[in-house]
Image (spheres, rainbow, N blue to C red):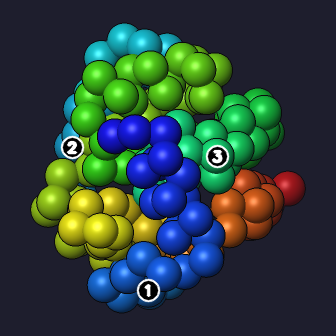
Amino acid sequence: MTKFTKLAALAAVILGTATAAQAELPVGAQAPEFTAKGALAGKEYSFDLQSALKKGPVVLYFFPKAFTPGCSAEANAFAQQIGAFEAAGAQVIGMSADTLPELKQFSVKECAGKFPVATASSAVIDAYDVAMEFNGQALTDRTSYVIAQDGEIMLAHSERDWRNHVSLTLAKVKQLKGS
């Protein structure tokens, strides 16, 4: 993908000209279980939602495309707040339709090695209702979920602007902890 194509995709995401299939899964729904291959600090990483939930709530955030300005800014913001998420007992994982080699680089450069990012398969994209298309390219819509330990979705936030995703998910995990 050329730099121009990436910027055009980002503009479409921000301006809302890309098409999303539906909004998101509803609060109160059970989060679909999945496993995914991803990267943490540039190294291959396997993620299993069911195993992660045994440790505490999970912030599952979907982003459209690695290394686009909004997605990079969102990853930077999550990385800056990772200590607060951990203090609230939550794990953060980013998901996109990007390839594993792209996500390995993204996990180092934009996530600062602080949390994993994983490749969302078409089954995961469909299960979480985050399918988006731009110029025939399958992407994921920008949607963040907070999933409680019992698998219940406690927050679902879909907004193309990345800026509220970190603060809203952090507030919800703090509320779950009771702090």
Comparing 96 with 169, the one in front is: 96
Residue 133 to residue 23: above or below = above
Number of marks in the image?
3
**Nearest to N terminus: mark 2 or mark 3:** 2
Q: Are the residues flagged by discs 2 and 3 in contact, CB closer than 8 Å?
A: no
**Horizontal and vertical percent position of residue 86:** 68, 35
Quadrant of the drawing holding the C terminus: bottom right
Q: Image point 37% across, 62% down: which residue?
A: 140
What whole-number distance in Å separates the C-alpha atoms at marks 3 and 1? Answer: 22 Å
- The furthest residue to the right: 179
- The residue tagged with tag 1: helix, strand or loop? loop
What whole-number distance in Å separates the C-alpha atoms at marks 1 and 2? Answer: 22 Å
Residue 153 to residue 48: above or below = below
Q: Image point 72% across, 55% down: which residue?
A: 166
What whole-number distance in Å separates the C-alpha atoms at marks 2 and 3? Answer: 27 Å
Quadrant of the drawing holding the N terminus: top left
Q: Is residue 117 left or right of residue 87?
A: left
Question: Does residue 116 appear in this view?
Answer: yes
**Horizontal and vertical percent position of residue 119:** 28, 42
Report which quarter residue 48 is drawn in.
Answer: top left
What residue type is disc 3 on? Pro
Query: Which tag is nearer the camera, tag 3 or tag 1?
Result: 3
What residue is shown with label 2? 35
The crowd level at tag 2 (other Cα within 10 Å; few <14, some 14-19, many 20+) is some
- The residue tagged with tag 2: helix, strand or loop? strand
Comparing 13 with 115, the one in front is: 13
The crowd level at tag 3 (other Cα within 10 Å; few <14, some 14-19, many 20+) is few
**Nearest to N terminus: mark 3 or mark 1:** 1
Residue 58 to residue 104: above or below = below
What residue is shown with label 1? 23
What residue is shown with label 3? 69
Query: Which tag is nearer the camera, tag 2 or tag 3?
Result: 3
